[in-house]
């Protein structure tokens, strides 16, 4: 396997970018937020309009964040194919919530 041969500054910048991508890919909701979303979902029929709006905003945020996570994981996989030593092990998202 060949080693990635790049300028030291470029390699350093790529390492930082991989770190950011990894943070996005591994993001998890805070437990309190997840519990609140679950609570609102379970009693959606009896929620006030303010609570329904709160749940809608949570759901919209989570949909956007999930898309970002998938995009970050896709880029990490692509980078891993061309420079596995730069990316290291890919995050395991199989247990993601």
Image (cartoon, rainbow, N blue to C red):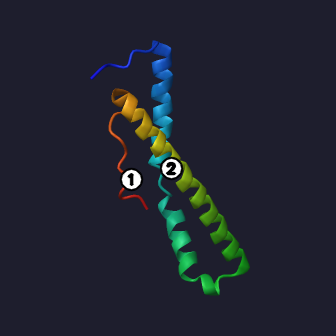
Q: Secondary structure at mark 1?
A: loop
Q: Residue furthest bottom?
A: 46
In the displayed structure image, the side of residue 46 where residue 38 appears, left or right:
left
Of 66 and 75, which appears nearest the observer? 75
Task: Give the position of the C terminus as an image quadrant.
Answer: bottom left
Q: Residue at x 33, y 27 (%)?
A: 85
Mark 1 Cα-neighbour bin, 10 Å: few <14, some 14–19, many ≥20? few
Q: How many marks?
A: 2
Q: CA distance from mark 2 to mark 1?
A: 9 Å
Q: Position of residue 19 (x, y in %)?
A: 46, 35
Q: Residue at x 55, y 70 (%)?
A: 36
Q: Which mark is residue 93?
A: 1
In the displayed structure image, the side of residue 15 where residue 40 appears, left or right:
right
In the displayed structure image, the side of residue 94 where residue 7 appears, left or right:
right
Q: Residue furthest left?
A: 1
Task: Give the position of the N terminus as an image quadrant.
Answer: top left
Q: Is residue 34 above or below residue 14?
A: below
For marks 2 and 1 on the same chain, the one whose residue lies earlier in the sequence: 2
Residue carrying label 2: 69
Q: Residue at x 55, y 49 (%)?
A: 68
Mark 2 vs 1: CB contact within 8 A: yes
Q: Position of residue 58 (x, y in %)?
A: 61, 64
């Amino acid at each position: 396997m060949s080693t990635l041969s790049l300028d030291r500054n470029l390699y350093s910048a790529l390492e930082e970018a991989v770190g950011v991508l990894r943070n996005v890919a591994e993001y998890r909701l805070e437990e309190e937020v997840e519990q609140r979303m679950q609570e609102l979902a379970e009693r959606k029929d009896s929620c006030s309009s303010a609570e329904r709006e709160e749940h809608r905003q949570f759901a919209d945020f989570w949909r956007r964040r999930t898309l970002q996570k998938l995009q970050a994981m896709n880029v990490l996989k692509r980078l891993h194919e061309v420079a596995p030593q730069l990316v290291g092990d890919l995050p395991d998202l199989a247990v993601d919530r």
